[in-house]
Image (cartoon, coloured by chain):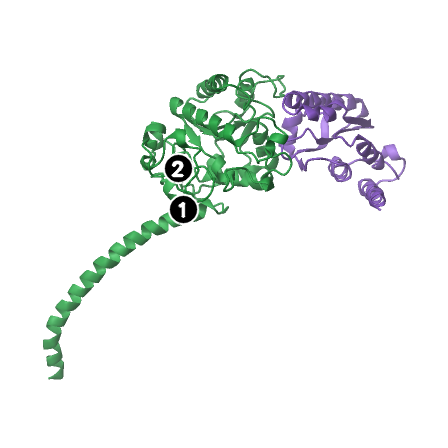
Amino acid sequence: MKRLNKMLLLALSAMLVMAGCGGKAEAVDILPGDAAAALVEQVDFQDSLQAAAGDVAAQFYNLDDTITDFAIYISGSGATAEEVAVLKVEKEADAAHAEGIIKERLGTLKDMFENYRPDEMVKIGDPVIETRGNVVYFVCTSDTRGAKDAIAALYKA
Amino acid sequence: MQIRRKRQNRSPGIVKAVVVLLVTGGISFCLAFVWQNVSQATTQVSRDNQREDTEAVVLSQEPVDAASLSADPPPDSGEESAAESLPEESGESDSGEEAEDAGEESEAVPDGTNRPAPAPEAVPLSPRVSNRYLEDALFFGDSLSVGIPLYQVAGNPDTVAFTGINPLSINTSQVINSPQGKLTLLEAAKQYGEKKKVYIMLGGNGLWMDEKSFTEGYQTFLDSVKAQYPGAQIFLQSILPVTEDAHLTYETADNDVIRGFNKLIIGLAKKNGVYYLDVAQALMDNNGVLPKEASPLDGMHLTPEYYEKWFDYLKTHTVEEK
């Protein structure tokens, strides 16, 4: 029953994100705010994730003008390395730049937690980073399977 | 005749009435004076428990005796005056004469609880100020302070914080991302320009250190802060308490250890002529520990509600600007 509910939620979130769009899955116009909210909802996290306000998020991730839209959720209590980031660039060619930003953030998380809470290094060492078209996804969680499924669900018709 | 007689009889009556009026007036004046003072004190205690955010920026012209207004007053057998331990410019009251020495800070209040008494050296209770008071403030800290911008607490004052930073690493670790590359917290803070108030919460990640390393590291950072912000009021915030089972996640997390390090921070505040804020008082329960509800995840990191309590404390423990 729980699995069924989860599948329904995945389907629902996919429909929400794809609302207004049609055609092929990879051509979906992803809205980072909706996508990140769906990931936070679908993926299992130990901590409660908090949406970072635009300027705060930009500072945490050292974002630049290449990122045209984004949504970032960070461990609310600061106790875990759990995060969700969805970065959108204008051209697919710029996606590598967004990936670089994600990897830099990952390095920062490593600096934060390796001596502080070494158990968090399991998540930091195996993050979900996926690029789909002009959107880059980053999910730092122990539920990597759930994160991958949730990202895939965003593109299912 | 009747009128006349009345007038004749009224003369002594008027005298009596005047006397009675004078006496009752005097008594009323005294009562009003006493009531006003009691009322003022009661209002301040009441305000301490409210989260009402008024626009009135009222600072502590005459700092209130925090100890006497606290729900948990300290023992009255102390010797040291707060006036001796707070900065000269603080305008502190002499309330500390009735408080105990810093060395007794962790002793329980004789109110039937195990709650430690407020540190007598701490900035006393003052009328509540609005978020505007913090607009010219800068916060330095560790993971707990990371939550300030994340939760947009108290109008989101400028904050430079990094998870895991401690009194030693804060001086040298280049960990803050910027367009110029990795910066130390102090270097990164320059982007915010001049500040009139600097709040530091540091030490929660240094509970494993020996006292000498802790004090020297903290002092080095304090020297750098004073050099970078020469005209600012500097506030050292206490390390916050943890839950009873926090040690299950953080080996060194122990409230007795924390109280010991807070004494070192009080000593640093005295030595450097800066202010000490006993924020721990705002978060602990009657057993002197952080309640589980404040940090259900790991016993140390706070829920948004407890950030509000933290900043309520800051907004009711202020110091008059010079």
Q: Which chain is green?
A: B
Residue corresponding to mark 1: B44
Q: Which mark is residue A20?
A: none
Instruction: Say which element carries label 2.
Output: loop
Q: Which mark is residue B124?
A: 2
Where B57 sits versus A103, above or below?
A: below
Q: Which chain is purple?
A: A
Is residue A139 rendered to the left or right of residue B212?
A: right
Is residue A40 rendered to the left or right of residue B252?
A: right
Label 2: how many Cα within 10 Å (few below 14, some 14–19, many 20+): many
Is residue A152 rendered to the left or right of residue B295?
A: right
Q: Residue at x 13, y 74 (%)?
A: B10
Mark 1 or mark 2, which has the lower sequence index? Answer: 1
Please state the chain letter of the residue tagged with numbered disc 1 in the rendered image. B
Q: Position of residue B212 (x, y in %)?
A: 47, 17
Where B287 sits versus B140, above or below?
A: below
Name the amino acid, label 2: Pro
Name the amino acid, label 1: Gln
- Assign the C terminus of chain A to one quadrant of the image: top right
